[in-house]
Amino acid sequence: MARRRKGDKIDGWMVIDKPLGLSSAKVVSRVKYLTKAQKVGHGGTLDPLASGILPIGLGEATKAMPFIVDATKEYAFTVRFGSATDSDDLEGAVIEDGGRIPSEAEVAAILPDFTGSIEQVPPAYSAIKIDGQRAYKLARDGQEVELKPRTVEIQSLSLTGFDADAGSADLHVSCGKGTYVRSLARDIAKALGTCGHVTALRRLRVGPFTLKGAISLEMLDELGHSARAVDYLCPITTALDDIPAVAVTEPEADRIRCGQTLQLPTAKQGTIVLMFGDTPLAIAENKDGTVRSLRVFNM
């Protein structure tokens, strides 16, 4: 007999405006405690230093998590020039100091060099695994961490403010999966002939989720265990808006639930969302008219 999962069956997305000082894991724990949901997970880690959008998947929404992790993200961040840290942000130890402060015009002029497809080396303090261990753990243990460069996509990068006295610049970036803003800040400073690190970082968007639909942990705490908390849930399909939806009949829905394939020669090729009425049935793949489910929603 299948083991019954503890908690309430709650399916959907809760978009949290994560405060400074909390890890993403602690936010997930808090949401799970307050909603009593059976299953909870987050889409895209935010460091304790960072604030902003943290999509939390509840129940069946966790099956769509890969589409959120891979989604385009937007950040507002501040770079302080003239000093570097071992973590490329405020949390690390200073490893270089006394670098020059570039002018506002110099910063603005260098930004086009960091748009499009670029190569970047992730920070040593990152969650990337090296021989089965997280890079940040090795770095904290004093071991030398060597990470290979990777290609990331920077859709847009702009200067939104400059403080000559503080030696800092405010920037806005829209980027693809795998981008490290800390690495971006470090590399911009290097290209300007100096060093730098991130002093403030706020995530403004993850795919379809923005600050407009976000709820603070403080507000969620005020709602407590009341049913009003689930009023802030977004449908599972919110994370799948960019994927073509295909309607299926009841017999076809039964076949998918049983793990069988469908023949849908007129459906769009590639990844699709199968819908039975207004209910998402499955994320599936259509290859030459043969549709196989990738993740079936138990709605």
Image (cartoon, rainbow, N blue to C red):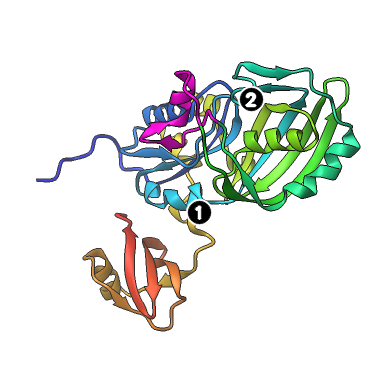
Q: Which residue is mark 1?
A: 238
Q: Position of residue 26 (x, y in %)?
A: 44, 25
Check disc 1 and report its element: helix, strand or loop: helix
Residue drawn where x is 69% and y is 33% of the image? 186
Q: Judge from the rendering whether residue 93 lies leftward or rightward of residue 245; answer left or right.
A: right
In the drawing, does residue 44 fall left or right of residue 61? right
Position in image of residue 220 (x %, y %): 50, 29
The mark found on residue 89 in the picture is: 2
Q: Indicate the quadrant containing the N terminus: top left, top right, bottom left or bottom right.
A: top left
Point out the stretch of residues depicted in magenta.
Answer: 124-145
Q: Residue furthest bottom?
A: 265
* Residue visible at 43% across and 43% down in the picture: 57
Instruction: Indicate the quadrant where residue 224 lies.
Output: top left
Q: Amino acid at mark 1?
A: Thr
27 in the magenta segment: no
Mark 2 or mark 1, which is nearer to you?
2
Q: Is residue 135 magenta?
A: yes
How many numbered discs? 2
Report whether residue 121 is seen: yes
The residue closer to the viewer here, 193 or 174, is 193
